Image (cartoon, rainbow, N blue to C red):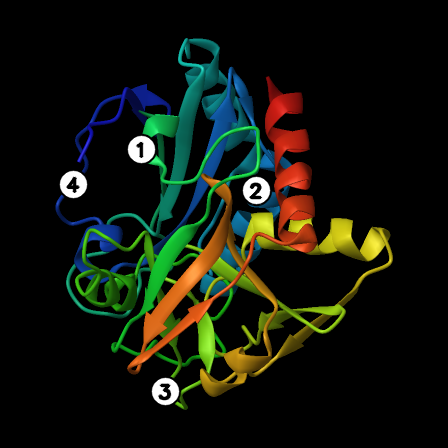
Amino acid sequence: VDAPLQSLINGQPTNLISIADRGFQYGDGCFETVRVAGAHPVLLEAHLNRLENSCQQLGIPLPLTTLMQEIEQLLLSNSWPHAVLKITITRGVGGRGYRPDPHAQSNRIVQLFAYSTAESPADGNGIEPGVSVMLCQHRLSSNRALAGMKHLNRLDQVLASREIPEQFAEGLCMDQAGYLVEGCKSNLVLLRGDKLITPDLSESGVNGIMLQYLLNRFREDGLTVESARVSFEELNDIGEAFLCNSVFGVWPVIKLSGNATVFSWPVGSKTQQAIHYKNEIFNAAR
């Protein structure tokens, strides 16, 4: 794993944090991962809005103005054309036991990582060749109180990711009831007929920033977008599929393997349109 180019903890350049921090002890916190093009973070406002909502839901104080100053401080010194900004908020040091100290001071960790487009099996400004993905056997936990946010408890994603061989770019995960939710690190979008379908994220998964951006753009262009519970067998009715997240943008899915079945899809017009939307904001940020 690449070490961060730079790290700020509560505004100070350091890589060290207390072992008593509740983020380390209990996964008590949340985070955002933002693609940086030049010195410009892509969709930063939307990421900060979700971060603020997540902190409110967890009851963790978030000094947003101070955090913004620290992000700007880190980005000013960035000379990498492609980078990834990671923002982590923990509840801070709160002693032993699960019950949080109501007076604990939250910690702000801002990190900048180098990002190489060569690491992506499908990245660039043209029509990506597409990726092969697999169905993971590990199923995601269901919890309405935590669904949607990027909290620090990512063991579901860790366990599912351990299943993925190198020939697959990503693994798809189901919920406890056997319905598709998302990829280990991405959201899933499907074309059924003339409608875009996204798996229901009300009980599991992350409500992705790139996902919401793309769906809003499709709606603006008059396309019907629906959220639904989608079983693996219903993929027989799908005409296109793509994955998206805030770092790599959009990956066309051309093959999905799982349950002794292989689905194949073309890089169709709606997937190409999603790539176009992604390229617009990535290129504009530069």
Judge by depth and name the residue closer to the eye, 189 or 3.
189
Residue 58 in percent (x, y) is at 45, 63
Residue labelled with disc 1:
119
10 Å crowding of disc 4: few (<14), some (14-19), many (20+)? few
Q: Which mark is residue 59?
A: none
As drawn, 220 above or below 1: below
Q: Which label's residue is closer to the chain start, 3 or 2?
A: 2
Residue labelled with disc 4:
18
Name the side, left or right, on which 48 lies relative to 184.
right
Q: CA distance from mark 3 to mark 4?
A: 35 Å
Q: Amino acid at mark 3?
A: Gln
Say which element carries label 2.
helix
Judge by depth and name the residue closer to the eye, 48 or 90.
48
Q: CA distance from mark 3 to mark 1?
A: 32 Å
Residue labelled with disc 3:
176
> Which image quarter: residue 120?
top left
Say which element carries label 1.
helix
Q: Which label's residue is closer to the chain start, 4 or 1?
A: 4
Q: Which label's residue is closer to the chain start, 4 or 2?
A: 4
Q: Residue at x 54, y 55 (%)?
A: 208
Residue 224 in percent (x, y) is at 79, 67
- Quadrant where the N terminus is found in the figure: top left
